[in-house]
Amino acid sequence: MCGIFGYVGSRRDAGTLVVEGLKNLEYRGYDSWGMAYKPNGSIVVRKDIGKISDVRSEDFGAPCSLAIAHTRWATHGGVTQCNAHPHLSCDGKIAVVHNGIVENYGPLRDALKTKGHTFLSQTDTEIIPHLIEEEMKNTADFAAAVRGAVRKLDGRFAVVAMHTDSQSLVAARNGSPLIIGAIKGATQGYCVASDIPAFLEHTRTVQYLDDGEMAVSDGRGILFSDIATGAERTKREIEITWSPEQARKGDFEHYMLKEIMEQKESVARAVNQNEEQILTLAKAIQEARGTFLVGCGTAGKACMAADYFFSVVAGKHVNYTPASEFKLYHRFLKPESLVIVVSQSGETADVLEAMRVAKSKGSKVLAVVNVEGSTIHRDADYTLLINAGPERAVASTKALTGQLAVLLLIAYALAGKLRDGRTVLLETAAEINDMLNPRYVERLKKLAEKLKDCRDLFIIGKGWNYPMALESAIKIQEVSYVHAEGFAGGELKHGPIALIEQGTPCIVLAGEDEVQQDILNNATELKARGAFIIGVAPRKHEVFDAWIKVPDAAAAQPIVNIIPIQVLSYFLAVSRGKNPDMPRNLAKSVTVK
Ligand code: M6R
């Protein structure tokens, strides 16, 4: 939530560079944007409501070599130009961008007011430049003043600050991500950003700032230190594998469609895991006393499906809990417990909180993540990467199928059938390649056209298709704003069936499995009340009014069943005139609790 990008270095187009980079972070928040630079020695701020993608980066071409920028997802204060970042100190000499929430901003603001500071916005962030300004009454060292200021903050933050009289960029982190990109060679410099795609065009050499750390750079070098003690820290430079091309939209109109299509390859990449590592992890799960699966939103639905994978494939009982509920389970955690956290971004606040709870009980954490070097990836005891490549659309698609593939592979390994698991999944990957052909996609587009004005849409599933019914609802809701709800097929007659009217569209997710007849019976019950039944299944059944064919994928059925729903959701959004990459009220990475 919120994207930050800063640059300092030998280039003289820092303003243009940060605005361009910020466009690559727009998925983190898009209600307003802002930037600060120093074209003539003093700080100039530009900010507005709306999307950074609508801004011309050439308009910030005035020569300068230090700039910061921010794209906002509002927490404190409405979406107004005034509340957009950067925020300034009273003297206008200090500019700050911030991601996170300052929990003690109320008392800090009151104290600053009594010292004569005036505030222009309703944000928690605005206290930070004023706190730095106060600190600068006791020191001329800007970095030391930032250190003094951020030490006073409670809560989660990533802060980047600049000063009129300093050529240094100062960054501090506690709980919200900040990554340094080191640009080598003739145009030497440093970028600091909330996520890697911001600077992927310029460098793949990164250094991760950890919680409680800060970085200071004048563009020629960088110094890392501990916020609390000031002690210097040494950081390893890491070369990341993502390429700038992977992060681009290419010829696709939206990232969401690009990422759906990438599943032709990404599922196979997810299966490409080190055999020994998977077997070690399977052993850890086997030996654990209590295994928990924890995630949020779509990643949570992958966990829920894995609950069925572990049970059906490996006969192993695990406990799925949404990350936001996990802390109430602390009583069941022991040092011998294992908590498997699943996250695309590796930065989700509720998942980080779940990890903290697990660690406080001495439990071990296995992270299944997409973003290498993310906080969750770095803080876990064991890790597995799903290798999906950058996922930019807010709606998670290829990350979900990658997560499902990795979790299913672990379930097979647990059952002592790792090779079989690999075969099932690689066959599924090949089937996905066949399935996502232009004719198939066109059929789903037509179906979306037909459904675009429906008031409600229901999706049912049973067994491992039940979490996919819930996931289908998330996908449809978040990008098209159609009211969609997912249910376990058997639950309908306990209440929700009252919502079915003549023509109500109901999607039925089925497979060639032991619960097939049950879900078809549920579909029949819906049809008897007038529902229009859209079957997603390997075979056409009599009860279906419309049929979306999917391969028979055995335990990988949830993977192939969700893909046509992703395509359908995409076209539902487009046919309703919505931008599926930037759904209202949402942000890609939820870094607040
Ligand atoms: O980065 P994470 O996988 O931890 O994110 C979890 C959820 O915020 C995410 O899946 C969200 O539900 C997506 N918008 C769903 O498409």
Image (cartoon, grey):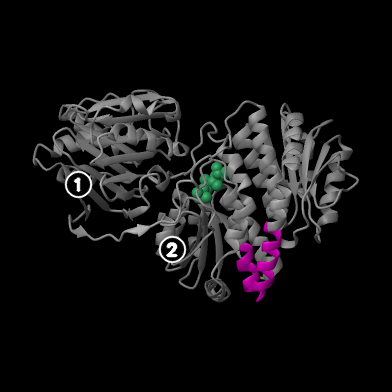
| Residue 190 highlighted magenta (yes or no) | no
Q: Can residue 86 be seen in this view?
A: no
Mark with earlier residue (1, 2): 1
For label 1, the SS is: helix
Q: Is residue 573 visible?
A: yes
Tell me whether circle 1 and circle 2 mark residues in contact (CB < 8 Å). Answer: no
Residue in view at x 64 percent, y 32 percent: 573
In the image, the segment drawn in magenta is: 407-429
Q: Identify residue for label 2.
A: 380
Where's residue 243, x and y in %?
A: 46, 50
The quadrant of the rendering that contains the C terminus is top left
Where's residue 450, x and y in %?
A: 77, 30
Q: In the displayed image of the protein, which residue is found farthest to the right?
A: 542
Q: How dense is the environment of label 1, judged by Cα within 10 Å: few (below 14), some, or many (20 and up)?
A: many
Residue in view at x 25 percent, y 50 percent: 214
Where's residue 540, x and y in %?
A: 87, 48
Quarter of the figure with residue 578: top right
Residue in view at x 57 percent, y 64 percent: 272
Q: What residue type is labelled 1?
A: Arg
Quarter of the figure with residue 480: top right
Q: Identify residue for label 1.
A: 147
How far is the residue under mark 1 from the one under mark 2? 28 Å
What secondary structure is the stretch in magenta mostly built from? Answer: helix
Which one is nearer the viewer's eye here, 344 or 390?
390
Whether residue 414 sits left or right of residue 431 in the image: it is left
| Residue 412 highlighted magenta (yes or no) | yes
Whether residue 547 sits left or right of residue 4 in the image: it is right
